[in-house]
């Protein structure tokens, strides 16, 4: 669903897919990136703050990201198969308000959802728009386990630079004038 | 450096340690959690937005977290070896303003730093304080590659519940009155 900026309707949600977290992979991720005892030791974890083993928050976030990338790529392939050209998204400038609301335990099936909350044209990057996306993750009991706000860039399909910008781009492309402009 | 709430001086920074990101581990993390071509395919990545392979932002974040946990545990062990009792930290309620400022490339040595920006006693959780921590990561040229603000709980050493809270706790512990209080 790499849509073009113009085709994105704020308020729309997409179900990205789900993943069942096993004890084995929770421990594996924990040992690599978050070796607190309640992420790596099922016995010790029983006496910890969650009363048992839970996934590292970064594990939940990373897995959700994987599922989103897979979804975007699959959607792009589908568009191409239909003879359409998928839109272009850029790297994310950052994440805001990331909250861990409930623990993810072994056997939990977590589904991830994205909602485009708002969109605007970028002031600093002509030809691009900025989306504010909400990522949410729910367990099999529909309990929210994780939520974050992630900004991302989305390319404009119908970008026509204004006269001033076009003149500037043309001038900047001429070797001597370009050098003068860039020197300022 | 799991210090007690009372012993934490806002504005203090700690160097947590560093890690050199190899091409092999960048690709391995990318395939598991962020399979965009500029995280998993060095050849294709040359034509991508970064002009080469770069680590997933979640890889940088997760590795920084690992280094922080190792640092905290090592410091706790050191305190115990000195006959001191380490403080108690609680799970993080969330992350704010996470920004990826510069790419992390194969061979980059990234060092992580934490600064306690401010502290306050928790209004909702008696006996605990809330810290606002800044995590920063720099490459070998001292360029900031990643920054985030992470809140965390820190236990008060000298917590003495006030008369009202103590009475409430005592009453709540009595079976019949406790049931009445909790029913409201």
Image (cartoon, coloured by chain):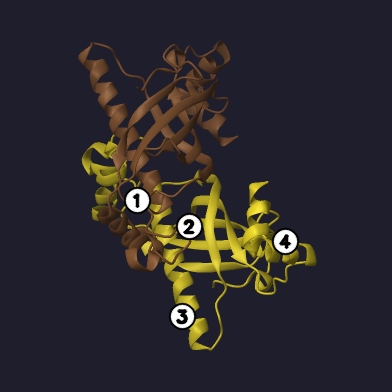
Chain colours: A yellow, B brown
Specify the label residue A105 is tagged with: 1
The answer to which of B169 and A129 lies nearer the viewer is A129
Instruction: Please provide percent x and percent y for residue B114.
Output: 43, 29
Q: Chain of mark 4?
A: A
Residue named by callout 4: A168
The answer to which of B126 and B57 lies nearer the viewer is B57
For the residues beneath circles 3 and 4, the answer to whether they share a chain is yes
For the residues beneath circles 2 and 4, the answer to whether they share a chain is yes
Q: Chain of mark 1?
A: A
Specify the label residue A138 is tagged with: 2
User: Can residue A148 be seen in this snapshot?
Assistant: no
Which label sits in the foreground, 3 or 4? 4
Q: In percent of the image, x 39 and y 27: which residue is there?
A: B89
For the residues beneath circles 1 and 4, the answer to whether they share a chain is yes
User: What is the spatial separation of the Cα atoms under label 3 and label 4, in whole angstroms?
Assistant: 37 Å
The answer to which of B102 and A30 lies nearer the viewer is B102
């Amino acid at each position: 669903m790499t849509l073009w900026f113009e085709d994105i309707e704020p308020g729309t949600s997409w179900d990205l897919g789900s993943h069942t977290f096993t004890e084995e992979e929770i421990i594996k991720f924990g040992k690599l990136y978050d070796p607190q005892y309640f992420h790596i030791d099922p016995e010790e974890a029983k006496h910890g703050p969650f009363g048992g083993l839970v996934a590292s928050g970064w594990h939940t976030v990373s897995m959700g990201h994987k599922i989103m990338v897979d979804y975007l790529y699959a959607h792009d392939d589908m568009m191409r198969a239909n003879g359409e050209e998928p839109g272009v998204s850029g790297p994310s400038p950052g994440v805001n308000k990331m909250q861990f609301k409930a623990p993810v335990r072994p056997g939990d099936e977590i589904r991830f959802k994205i909602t485009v909350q708002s969109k605007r044209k970028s002031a600093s990057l002509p030809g691009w728009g900025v989306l504010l996306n909400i990522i949410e993750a729910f367990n099999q009991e529909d309990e929210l386990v994780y939520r974050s706000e992630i900004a991302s860039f989305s390319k404009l399909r119908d970008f026509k630079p204004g006269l001033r910008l076009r003149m500037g781009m043309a001038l900047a492309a001429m070797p001597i004038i370009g050098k003068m402009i860039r020197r300022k």
